[in-house]
Amino acid sequence: MARRSVRSSKRPSSSAEPPTLPVGPVPIDTGTAEVVPDLDHSGRVTLQVNGVPSSYLDLDDPGFLAFEYMQQMDAVVAATTDGPLRALHLGAAGCALARRWDVERPGSRQLAIDVDARLVTLVRAWFDLPRAPRLRLRADDAAAAVATAPPASYDVVVRDVFAGDATPEHLVTRQVAERVAAALRPGGLYLVNCADRPPLDRARRELATLAAAFGPDAVASGRLALVAEPGILKGRRYGNLVLAAVRPLPEDAADTDDADNAAPDLGAPALARALRALPVPAQVLTADELARFVGTARPY
């Protein structure tokens, strides 16, 4: 499927020695990884893990995003969060989102987790990723990384973990979602890449799980949202949906009228406009629309 890109206005400084990329599949702990050049665009590559496209990178432009769901995640973050980010990425691969946020939000501190230790070492060498403390890479299970995360330590947590075309079952549970909420600062954002096919039962159950983990008013208060292309939402085809959840503020902060201290409203018109303006327009469901979509789905 053709993908349209979001480009950064900023360019990195050129390195004296560009990384040497492998030719053909390379063994990793979980199978193979391969860097496939884009024959139509010099300097752009797809990282395939076990034959599945996992990241698309422009090696000359770290702000470049090609996958639509990443563009949607970036739009949600841009509409709800200012300044440098403290971000935890569950599922590292080529670190496309982390590269963009590093260049677009100077001063950010990010940690990317991948279960494959060999892949973590290779992508650091292949793609000239930002160094620590800007971007740290760690080999670990995503659930274990969340369980040991310090409380209220992240502005954004991204879950983008797959085995084949599905997220491992142990990562979609209410327990993991509650641990993510605890790792977020109040008002912090959890972004989930949920791949699903009609009738979107997985997405409905994941949203029900997030509603249970992030508080009883998560749907009604606009702290839970679903973002996707209209064709996917209408159940026409398999695709990626972005689920977004905001950790509630403490009761004393939530009771104030200070807009600067309010939790992000995922139903704000500005976010809907930003999603419609993407190269492939997307739609956001919140509040009553989201409640109708979830229906009677049970949490995991």
Image (cartoon, rainbow, N blue to C red):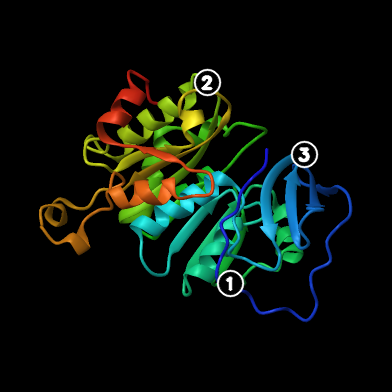
Residue 34 x/y as whole percent: 80, 49
Which residue position holds label 2? 198
Asked whether the residues under the numbered discs 1 and 2 touch, taking CB atoms below 8 Å apart as contact, a structural biologist would say no
Q: Nearer the viewer, mark 1 or mark 3?
A: 3
The residue type indicated by label 3 comes to Gly
Screen quadrant of the C terminus: top left
The residue type indicated by label 2 comes to Pro
Residue 38 x/y as whole percent: 78, 53
Asked whether the residues under the numbered discs 2 and 3 touch, taking CB atoms below 8 Å apart as contact, a structural biologist would say no
Cα gap from disc 1 to disc 3, whole angstroms:
29 Å
The residue type indicated by label 1 comes to Ala
Residue 283 x/y as whole percent: 41, 38
Asked whether the residues under the numbered discs 1 and 3 touch, taking CB atoms below 8 Å apart as contact, a structural biologist would say no
Screen quadrant of the N terminus: top right
Secondary structure state at the residue bearing disc 3: loop
Cα gap from disc 2 to disc 3, whole angstroms:
24 Å
Tag 3 or tag 1, which sits nearer the N-term? 3
Residue occupying image coordinates x 41% and y 56%: 77
Residue occupying image coordinates x 39% and y 33%: 174
- Based on the displayed image, in which of its 4 quarters is residue 7 positioned? bottom right
Res 257 seen here? yes
Q: Is residue 246 left or right of residue 192?
A: left
Which residue position holds label 1? 132
Which residue position holds label 3? 51
